[in-house]
Amino acid sequence: DVRNVLKIGEVETFSRFVQLCAGRNGQILNLSSLATDAGISPSTAGRWLSVLETSFIVMLLRPHHRNFNKRLIKNPKLYFIDTGLLCYLLQIPSPRELFQHAWRGAIFEGMVISDIAKNYLHRGERPPLYFWRDSHGHEIDLLIEQGSTLIPIEIKSGQTIAGNFFAGLHYWQSLSQEPQISPVLIYGGDQSFSSQGISVLSWKEL
């Protein structure tokens, strides 16, 4: 359907472009690099990506530019909304292979973010979702903007909690002027609880 909208004659080139997008799921988008790898111009890559986004095949998670006196990343992150389609494009044929796959974390992260976005869209609201990352690599996977309040969320696919899961959220707390907002860690386990001042939420409660 997207090929028809764009009137794309080079089906093989477009298919390669979509597969390259899948390989960048959960990564900061570099449009020039994507275009070069696909063998197309940056303007064509941008046009194709725009249609994928408006067709709800991918979503671009924009960075939040709150200034904590740090240089911030300004490019968006790319996520596929349908993780089944994503796994097909990545040639992951079964849940067992996904569980052991190197991209499991990025796929899980995208699933959580797209599910939260869908909750807003189903209510007819624009998803107020962002990520935050500075030039030193400190990152928050997801920020939900509620008025003047930001809720920081870290997403981990692990079924058990490791101490380093909290590192990004603690760093955010050290910079944020809103310490009263409880950060959230969403993980691949079954139990929800609080730890170190952070709400730990099972993915099953989304």
Image (spheres, helix red, strand yellow):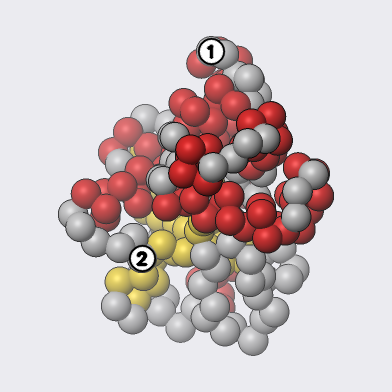
Instruction: State left or right for residue 140 relative to residue 180.
Output: right
Checking the image for residue 7, the label placed there is none
Can residue 26 be seen here?
yes
Image quarter in which the N terminus is found = top left
Q: Residue at x 75, y 48 (%)?
A: 40
Amino acid under disc 1: Ser
Q: Residue at x 20, y 57 (%)?
A: 124
How many angstroms separate mark 2 from mark 1 (CA)?
33 Å
Above or below for 183 versus 103? below
Instruction: State left or right for residue 33 relative to residue 186.
Output: right
Q: Which of 101 and 173 lies nearest the eye of the viewer?
A: 101
Instruction: State left or right for residue 162 relative to residue 184.
Output: right
Q: Which of 3 and 22 lies nearest the eye of the viewer?
A: 3
Question: Could you tell me residue 110's position as x and y percent?
Answer: 49, 42
**Circle 2 residue:** 128
Question: Could you tell me residue 75's position as x and y percent?
Answer: 64, 66
**Circle 1 residue:** 94
Tell me whether the residue at label 2 lies in contact with that at label 1, contact meaning CB atoms closer than 8 angstroms.
no
Secondary structure at numbered mark 1: loop
Q: Residue at x 30, y 41 (%)?
A: 206
